[in-house]
Amino acid sequence: MDVQPLDAFRNCIPLFQALADPARQDIIILLSEQERLTVNEIADQSKLSRPAISHHLKILRDTKLVAIEQKGTQRFYSLQLNDAIDLLKLFVKMVEETCPYYQSSESDSK
C-alpha cells in the first residue's frame, strides 16, 4: 500500500471532525464505560434529546467509531475503534517517516 503523507492526513479528516464535537466525545466516553447501549440509554445519561443523540451516533457510525448490533427491535451501539486506530497509526507513521521537523524522543536522548 503506497500511501502518501497528504493522503494519510486527508483520510483522517472525517475522524478528526467526528472527534472534535463535545457531544460525540461524551458519547464515546459513555460507550467506553459501558459495553453497549441503546439510543434511549445514551439519551438518559445526556443533556441532548434522543434525535440529537441519533444524529451524533450516525456520524460516529459513518466514521466507523461505533458499531450497531440489532437484537429484535433494539439497536445496541458499541465502540469500534480498530479502523480508526489503524488510520491514525498510519498517519503517525507517515509523519515520523517524512516530516523533516519531527524528532522522536529517542533521537533527542542520543
Image (spheres, rainbow, N blue to C red):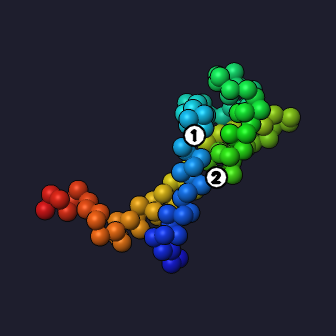
Kindly state the secondary structure of the residue where label 2 is placed.
Answer: loop
Q: In the depicted view, which residue is nearer to us: 30 or 72?
A: 30
Residue furthest right as drawn: 73
Coordinates of residue 8 in the picture (x, y in percent): 50, 66
Type of residue at label 1?
Answer: Asp
Question: Mark 2 = which residue?
Answer: 63
Type of residue at label 2?
Answer: Thr
Crowding at dot 2, Cα within 10 Å, few <14 / some 14-19 / many 20+, comes out as many
Sequence-first tag of 2 and 1: 1
Q: In the depicted view, which residue is nearer to us: 28 or 55?
A: 55
Residue 17 left/right relative to 59: left
Q: In the depicted view, which residue is nearer to us: 41 or 57?
A: 57
Look at 60% across and 55% down and name the residue there.
14
Q: Nearer the viewer, mark 2 or mark 1?
A: 1
Q: Image quadrant of residue 5?
A: bottom left
Crowding at dot 1, Cα within 10 Å, few <14 / some 14-19 / many 20+, comes out as few
Coordinates of residue 46 in the picture (x, y in percent): 64, 24
Q: Is residue 80 visible?
A: no
Q: Is residue 83 visible?
A: yes
- In this rendering, the answer to whether 31 lies above or below 69 is above
Question: Mark 1 = which residue?
Answer: 21
Kindly state the secondary structure of the residue where label 1 is placed.
Answer: loop
